[in-house]
Image (cartoon, rainbow, N blue to C red):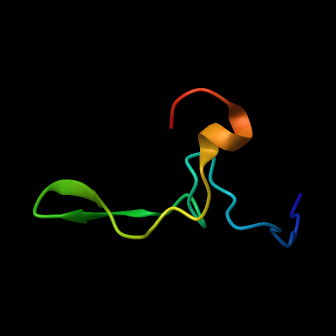
Amino acid sequence: MLVKVEALGPGVCHEGYQSCFFRRLEDGEWRVSEERTYDPAAIYGGKA
């Protein structure tokens, strides 16, 4: 099954980023490569 969707909102990643691909591998370490678009604690509760 193939589903085509249009994501709504400031981000779709549960960690608060535009997408789940917010890290990149640099010098053998994963580094965050973009800013958060929303505060997941405000949506899901608890600490971010």
Can you give x and y, in whole percent of width and height, for residue 16 in the image?
58, 53
Position of residue 6 in the picture relative to residue 11 (left or right): right
Residue found at the far left of this picture: 27
Can you give x and y, in whole percent of width and height, for residue 6 in the image?
85, 73
Can you give x and y, in whole percent of width and height, for residue 28 in the image?
13, 56
Give 45 or 30, whichever is nearer the viewer: 45
Image quadrant where residue 22 sits:
bottom left
Residue found at the far top of this picture: 46
Q: Residue at x 67, y 42 (%)?
A: 42
Give 19 or 3, whichever is nearer the viewer: 19
Q: Is residue 16 above or below residue 10?
A: above
Can you give x and y, in whole percent of width and height, for residue 35 in the image?
45, 68
Q: How many marks?
A: 0
Position of residue 29 in the picture relative to residue 8 (left or right): left
Quadrant location of the N terminus? bottom right
Q: Is residue 3 above or below residue 15?
A: below
Q: Residue at x 62, y 58 (%)?
A: 38
Q: Residue at x 87, y 69 (%)?
A: 5
Image quadrant where residue 25 sits:
bottom left
Image quadrant where residue 30 sits:
bottom left
Give 45 or 31, whichever is nearer the viewer: 45
Q: Residue at x 69, y 59 (%)?
A: 12
